[in-house]
Amino acid sequence: MSFQDTARDWTRHGSEDPLWAVLVDPAKRGGRWDADDFLATGRQEVDEALGVLDRLGGTPARTGVALDFGCGAGRLTQALAAHYDKVIGLDISEPMLDAARRLDRTGGRAVFQHNSTPDLAAIPTASVDLVFTSIVLQHVPPDAAESYLLEFGRVLRPGGAAIILMPNGVRPTVQGLLFRYAPPAVVGALQQRLLHYPAPMRMNTLPVRIMTSHLSHAGLRIIGTTDEPQHGPHWNFTRYYAVRPGAAAS
């Protein structure tokens, strides 16, 4: 899988069924996600994650800038806008961003930008108080995921925090083992031919020790993790809470 493959596939997903592609639910296929219900899932996830960050003592200023990496249709971007003055939603798929703008109810607090490279060159160094990313990094090649993790450290201000969801491995289910052992081209073909996906939806995992190493190299310190089984029956998801050491953001 190349980075260009990822961009192509998620452009197709965004064009055909963006809300379902963000939250895959057979009952919501074909545009059957209700927009209010879709956005409510984002509020619940963000509020719970920020609550954990608070309890861990890693909360940055809530009057600054948050970055929603891989924002898709803006499910989490809008939720973050209830806590921050400005939220930047970045995504690789222009059609996803179009959907996010159509759904936007933040009154201008959310800004949606296309990000077509395996870096965050459009975001200045030390300009963001919170990086939030959920069910995103597993869909990009591992080398791009590592690059983005390093970039999260660069764009965070001292005292800023990152909340990152990433699967650390597969569960011993048929689908989980298929993703682990079958060639990606075979998995993608099965998704399209048997499940009628608009495009392949590839999955990658990073063990906790690798994520820990990458975040350390990014200049971030992990202050806690949570297991997140609700994000899929075939993978073991971990949410990482990390801070960039330094003076608290103001």
Image (cartoon, grey):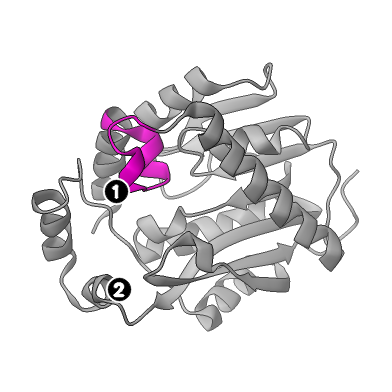
Quadrant of the image for the N terminus? bottom left
Q: Is residue 247 above or below residue 130?
A: below
- Mark 2 or 1: the one toward you: 2
- Image position, residue 170 (x, y; %): 37, 76
Q: Nearer the viewer, residue 135 or 222?
A: 135
Please tell me which residue is depicted at 19% across the width and 65% down the height of the picture: 184
- State the mark number for residue 38: none
Residue 96 occupies quadrant: top left
Q: At label 2, which amino acid type do we have?
A: Gly
- As drawn, is 113 to the left or to the right of 40? left
Question: Secondary structure beneath disc 1?
Answer: helix
Q: Earlier in the sequence, mark 2 or mark 1?
A: 1
- Image position, residue 126 (x, y; %): 73, 47
Q: Which residues are magenta?
A: 16-32
- State the mark number for residue 176: 2
- Image position, residue 180 (x, y; %): 27, 76
Residue 144 occupies quadrant: bottom left
Quadrant of the image for the C terminus? top right
Q: At label 1, which amino acid type do we have?
A: Thr
Residue 115 occupies quadrant: top left
Please tell me which residue is depicted at 25% across the width and 43% down the height of the picture: 9
- Image position, residue 148 (x, y; %): 51, 56
Q: Is residue 155 visible?
A: no
Question: Which residue in the protein does label 1 denote?
Answer: 6
